[in-house]
Image (cartoon, grey):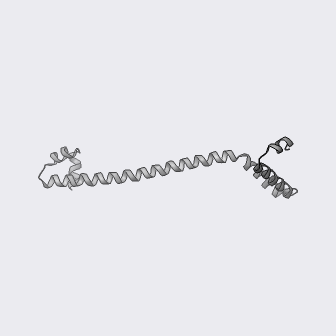
């Protein structure tokens, strides 16, 4: 039961919440189905902090997944740009008459990679 001192020091929101719970109690009396709902509501209100912490954690995980997806997309775009730039350089050096070994050295890649690009 609520003590009088607690009621006097309660905020308006707390007083309204108490009134709401009192109304729920009056409606529920004598109905087993509604009693079960009441018990669930009590449980939910007690677990509000746990729900808040759970939702906060879920949001953090979701944000991290979103950041990772963005980073992956940016990494793929950057890799494609570098690949295109490297491929152009390999073809330009090849057209200038450079050997595969020379192209590999100038592009800082393996000879097998030069051959793969030129095929």
Question: Which quarter shows the N terminus?
Answer: top right
Q: In this image, 79 relative to 103: left or right? A: right
Task: Kindly identify the residue that appears in the image at 76 percent across and 52 percent down.
Answer: 41
Q: In this image, 115 relative to 9: left or right? A: left
Which of 100/51 is in front?
51
Residue 115: percent from left, percent from top: 20, 51
Residue 3: percent from left, percent from top: 85, 42
Task: Kindly identify the residue that appears in the image at 21 percent across and 46 percent down.
Answer: 107
How many numbered badges does the structure rendering display?
A: 0
Q: In this image, 73 relative to 83: left or right? A: right
Q: Is residue 48 visible?
A: yes
Residue 43: percent from left, percent from top: 75, 48
Q: Is residue 3 visible?
A: no
- View extreme (right): residue: 30
Task: Kindly identify the residue that appears in the image at 63 percent across and 45 percent down.
Answer: 53
Task: Kindly identify the residue that appears in the image at 18 percent across and 43 percent down.
Answer: 105
Question: Which quarter shows the C terminus?
Answer: bottom left
Residue 89: percent from left, percent from top: 20, 52
Which of 100/8 is in front?
8
**Vertical side of 26 occupied by 47: above or below:** above
């Amino acid at each position: 039961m609520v003590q009088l001192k607690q009621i006097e020091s309660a905020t308006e929101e707390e007083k309204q919440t108490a009134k709401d719970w009192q109304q729920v109690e009056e409606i529920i009396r004598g109905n087993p189905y509604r009693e079960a709902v009441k018990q669930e509501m009590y449980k939910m209100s007690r677990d509000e902090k746990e729900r808040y912490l759970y939702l906060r954690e879920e949001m953090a995980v979701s944000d991290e997944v979103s950041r990772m997806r963005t980073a992956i997309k940016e990494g793929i775009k950057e890799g494609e740009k570098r690949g295109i730039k490297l491929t152009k350089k390999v073809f330009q050096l090849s057209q200038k008459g450079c050997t595969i070994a020379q192209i590999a050295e100038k592009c800082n890649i393996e000879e097998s990679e030069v051959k793969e690009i030129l095929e």
